[in-house]
Image: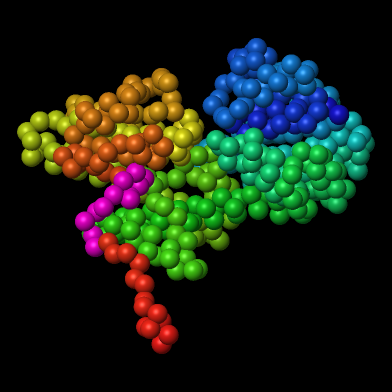
Amino acid sequence: MKVCLVGLGYIGLPTALIIAKQGFDVVGVDNNEEIVEKLNAGEVHLSELNVEGLLREVMAAGKFRASARPETADVFILNVPTPLNAEHEPDTSHLRSVTEQIVPLLRPGNLFIIESTCPVGTTDDFADSIFTARPELRGQVFVAYCPERALPGNLLFEFRRNDRIIGGIDQASTRHAMDFYSLLVKGKLFPTYSKTAEMCKLTENCHRDLQIAFANELSVICDKAGVNVWDLIELANKHPRVNILQPGCGVGGKYIAVDPYYIISSFSKEARLLKTVREINDLKAEYCVAQVRNAMLEFEVNHHRKPTVAMMGLTYKPNIDDLRHSPAKYIVTQVMQNCNNADILIAEPNLREHNVFKLTDFKTAYERADIVVFLTAHTPFLSLQYHENKKILDFCGIFKNRNTGELKMKNYERSDAESAYM
């Protein structure tokens, strides 16, 4: 069986290689010819655990190659970007362009799968376009929406083991897609229709956005109330039905910061909570920018010189190299644009270099800085020792376990005699 997977980005490439590892003949398609050339030379263009080794393995077995154009296949999988435009409306033009390229290649028995995040109803609309152009294929080509649930940094493991939602445009399409994914996925497969699967993907990330917004809003309130938010969340989570997430400097990444707009754009009047959640998480980044600027001004007044500021982290989450929609990157950019000639050091241990930011070793940046701003909780940062003589703005909890001076008591254990009366 041959699989044609279009879109060799952070999700698409690992997906293609996993499919090839299972014995399928896979052609991976990308319109970036430089990416195609690198892959065919056995080199990857992204940082993801074990991906480069897997690429070379499946190429040596003759199971994977890259191409700039789709080819005839038994299964087509679309994993192309569906970005937002300036008005936060989804742009499915890449998805539609690829579909138009594939339509002439379709044959009876083919399976056409969309994995890209998209507005509710997209799969049905694309199926209508396919069968309008090729009416003889109606009932002969099977169309489904099957969103991935993999976490960057651990994609190869999670693709195989996570449960999947399989949503066909009809029962036959769902059944064919279930049969295909059962050969790839060790997790459970849950059948449904395409609209439900599309909404499920968006709902999962909207829920995460909401949870993070509560933690971020709580962190701002605690800061103004003089309460240590890390201690507060730890204590509140002792309740058996409370599980508050850790706050950060905003929300980033390809999905959580973006997916709510796929619902908001289609259901603007109804999605009132989702709009507020997005505002809260975006405003947390602005709050962090203001805190850094205030600390710089205060230092300059007190010390009569410009401070050296270490901005620790650029990526949107710990221990990856992904900068997509990163609030940390946004904060660094805003601080640099209004730094008044202060010395700004940027540390990002997961990047060797950056075409805009000059990077500094994180230990050097920490030691040289008067003001240290922790934006991303990278594991290497946890090795740093707290310095009382530095102004530390810890937006991601690097030093959350440090003794803050608040009263700390061991768990109170009742005596046997006392326990007998409880």
Which residue, as the protein is rendered here, is positioned at the far front?
416
Residue drawn 86% across the image and 29% down it: 1
Residue ID at (81%, 39%): 183
Residue drawn at point x = 91 percent, y = 39 percent: 140
Closer to the camera in the image, 93 or 247:
247
How many labels were placed on the picture? 0
Please provide percent x and percent y for residue 225.
24, 61
> At 39% across and 40% down in the image, what residue appears?
377
Classify residue 67 as left or right of residue 379.
right
Res 105 → quadrant: top right
Q: Quadrant of residue 35?
A: top right
**Outermost residue, bottom side:** 421
Q: Which residues are magenta?
A: 396-407
Q: Main secondary structure of the magenta part?
A: loop
Residue 415 image point, x, y percent: 36, 78
Q: Is residue 400 within the magenta segment?
A: yes
Left or right of 298? Residue 316 is: right
- Where 133 falls versus 43 (above or below)? below
Query: Residue 221's x, y, as percent?
Result: 30, 59
Residue 347 to residue 163: above or below? above
Task: Return the residue nearer the eye: 341 or 181.
Answer: 181
Question: Can residue 30 be seen in this snapshot?
Answer: no
Q: Where 75 sits versus 59, above or below?
A: below
Q: How is the image coloured?
A: rainbow
Image quarter in which the C terminus is found: bottom left
How far from the left and from the top, in percent, is residue 82? 61, 37
Q: Is residue 270 visible?
A: yes
